[in-house]
Image (tube, rainbow, N blue to C red):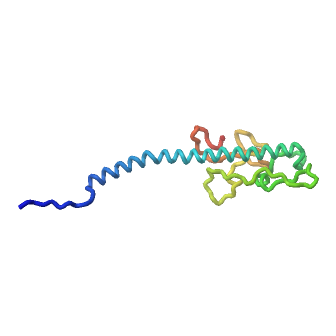
Amino acid sequence: MTAQRTSEAGFTLVELLVTLAIVGLLATLVLPVAQVATQRTQETELRRALRDIRAAIDAYHRASDDGRIAKEAGTTGYPPDLDVLVTGVEDQKDPEKHKIYFLRRVPRNPLASDPDLADAATWAKRSYASEPDDPQEGDDVYDVYAASPRVGLNGVPYNKW
């Protein structure tokens, strides 16, 4: 009598364990790379948003200095809030009083965690009267920054950008 071996389809337990170990190893290598890529994307968006908002604040101040925006005595000429950069202000030098707009929309802070906040509310603001080392909100918006305590890939905390 000859013994016949039946061929069974499937993988052995050892083959499955080796495959799982390889997949696990690859996952541990890929996950940090994906996290850094996500952080780099957020930082690029943050830089762009800060540049756009700061350019709009500076343009508002220049227009105020040029007499195109009405300002009361004793005010700095900086916008009272970020929303005015979108809603616009009347051009005092235009006979028809058309509005001057500085932003199409306020960019959202990419590091903001609360999705219910308005875009302008995702930024921490510094008034002209506050100290650079201790920025505080006030009657105007001199600068904006991300309030996140996290540190960027360049080693600088986001709230110092």
Q: Where is residue 145 drawn, in percent x and y?
A: 68, 45
The residue that appears at 94% across and 53% down in the rendered structure is: 95
Left or right of residue 19, residue 124 in this image = right
Q: Where is residue 39 drawn, in percent x and y?
A: 56, 46
Q: Residue furthest right?
A: 95
**Tally of numbered tags:** 0
Q: Where is residue 25 drawn, in percent x and y?
A: 38, 47
Q: Residue furthest left?
A: 1
The residue that appears at 61% across and 50% down in the rendered structure is: 111
Question: Which quarter shows the C terminus?
Answer: top right
The residue that appears at 90% across and 54% down in the rendered structure is: 97
Question: Which quarter shows the N terminus?
Answer: bottom left
- Of 55 and 111, which appears nearest the observer? 55
- Of 78 and 68, which appears nearest the observer? 68
- Of 24 and 149, which appears nearest the observer? 24
The residue that appears at 30% across and 52% down in the rendered structure is: 17
Q: Where is residue 117 drawn, in percent x and y?
A: 67, 58
